Amino acid sequence: MRLLLLEDIRKLGHVGDVVEVKPGYARNYLLPQRLATEPTAENIKAIEERRKAAAAERARRLREFTELVEQMKDVSVTIEAAANAEGTLYGSVHAKDIAAALNAQGFAVRAEHVLLDAPIRTLDNRMVTLEFTDELQTQVKVWVVREGGAPGESVDAGPAERSESPSKTEG
């Protein structure tokens, strides 16, 4: 089914593009959300001004993201999490946790920019990809450490101290 996009849709197209999509995607998502319409000559002409404004907005965002990527070279972030003696987290670290930690350091990163195949469930350090646009990506080092720990701390460090601390049963 051919549709005219009224909004930018990632991995599909930009405002004013005529795209071919499956009928169910058009009927159940694009049309009810008013993200697309029929590609008539009248609709294409009516959307031309919006297309120019959207192109200018994309260029502005690309400049901002390019500056952000330059600032984020060699950035690492530390996230403290509760873990057992083997280094397995009691919970997990998600994209929103990484985005929040980067925001705390002054980087305007949203959770949808963080690409994680699966939540992080162990104490470790790893490189995480941040994707701002289809062609603009960077990587940051994420340290997941035991609560009260520091980057570079060994997974084995800390269980003796944790076993001596009183349990938190009050609530």
Image (cartoon, helix red, strand yellow):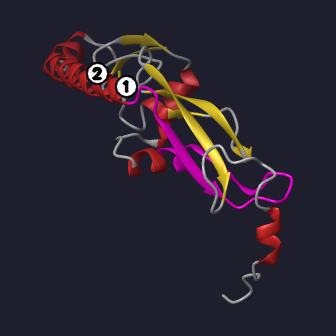
Furthest residue to the right?
A: 86
120 left or right, relative to 143 = right
Query: Which callout, 1 or 2, points to the residue nearer the camera?
Result: 1
| Front-most of residues 110 and 170 | 170
The answer to which of 74 and 135 lies nearer the viewer is 74
Q: Which of the two residues, 52 or 142, is positioned nearer the viewer here? A: 142
- The disc at residue 119 is none
> What is the x, y in percent for residue 14?
33, 18
Q: Is residue 136 visible?
A: yes
Residue 122 in percent (x, y) is at 76, 46
Dot 1 or dot 2: first in sequence order is 2
Q: Quadrant of residue 126?
A: top right
Snapshot quadrant of residue 149:
bottom right
Residue 93, magenta (yes or no): yes
| Amino acid type of the residue that numbered disc 2 sits on in the rendered structure | Leu
Question: Residue at horizontal 34%, vertical 41%?
Answer: 108
25 with respect to 168 (left or right): left
Tell me where the magenta segment starts and ends, as one range.
Answer: 72-99
To which residue does mark 1 refer?
69
Is 66 inside the magenta-drawn segment? no
Dot 2 alpha-carbon crowd within 10 angstroms: few under 14, some 14 to 19, many 20 or more: some
Q: Residue at x 51, y 43 (%)?
A: 77
Q: Residue at the left extreme?
A: 49
Mark 1 closeness class: few <14, some 14–19, many ≥20 residues within 10 Å: some
Q: Is residue 42 above or below residue 34?
A: above
Which residue is labeled 2 in the image? 62
